[in-house]
Amino acid sequence: MSLPRKSTRNGTRGYAHLVEVEVPAARVWRALIEPRLIRVWSGQDSEIDPRKGGMYRIGKLDASAREAHIDIFEPNRRLRLIYLNGRDSPPSDSAAVDDFILDVRHGEGKTSLRLLGSGIPDAPEWDQSYVKIRMGWERFLARIKVTLESPPKPKKPVHILPKDPPLPGLDY
C-alpha cells in the first residue's frame, strides 16, 4: 500500500539552457566576459574582473544587480559563477550557481553554449525570482546567439540635402 506523497518545498531547484551558436568558442567566451559585449546582448552595464576569484556583475550597482564570485575560469571552455545574496533577494541558506560550458561542435565554427543553473531555493518566496532568473537567461542566451551570428553593421552617414538650397549671391 502506498501513501499519498506529502509535498515539501525545502530543497533547491535549477534550470538548463542550450544554444548552438555558429561562431568559434573564443567569440562566445568574449561575449560572456567583456563588458562592452555584455552591454550589447543584455542592455545592461556590467563589471567583470575576468579571472578565477574575480567578480562578475550585470546591472547597476545601485539597482538590482546580480553579483557573483567567479569560481571556475577556463577561457573558451567554462565559467562558473557563485552568486552573492543580493539586497533584493529573499533570505537563503543555499548558494545560487550558474555554470556556462562551451563545447566546440562540427569543427571550429560552431559552439554549443550550455548554462546549468542551480541552488535556487524551492520556497514560495523565491518563485518569482526563480522565474525571472530562468526566463532572463533564456532570453539572454538567445540574444547572445543573434548578436554573434548577426553583428550590427555600422550605419553609413546620411547626407541630408537642405530643404531650400541657398541662392547664389545670397548665401552670406
Image (cartoon, rainbow, N blue to C red):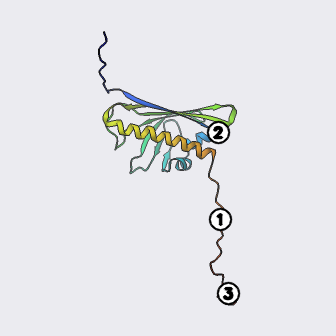
* Quarter of the image that includes the N terminus: top left
Q: Position of residue 32 (x, y in %)?
A: 55, 41
One can see residue 117 in this view: no
Query: Residue type at mark 3?
Result: Leu
- Residue drawn at point x = 59 percent, y = 45 percent: 146
**How many numbered dots are placed on residues in this image?**
3
Residue that sits furthest to the front in the current view: 1
- Residue drawn at point x = 32 percent, y = 26 percent: 10
For disc 1, the marked residue is 157
Cα separation between marks 1 and 2: 30 Å
Cα separation between marks 3 and 1: 26 Å
Q: Are marks 1 and 2 in contact (CB under 8 Å)?
A: no
Q: Which mark identifies residue 167?
A: 3
Residue that sits furthest to the bottom in the current view: 169
Looking at the image, is mark 3 or mark 1 earlier in the sequence?
A: 1
Q: Position of residue 44 (x, y in %)?
A: 48, 50
Local SS, label 3: loop
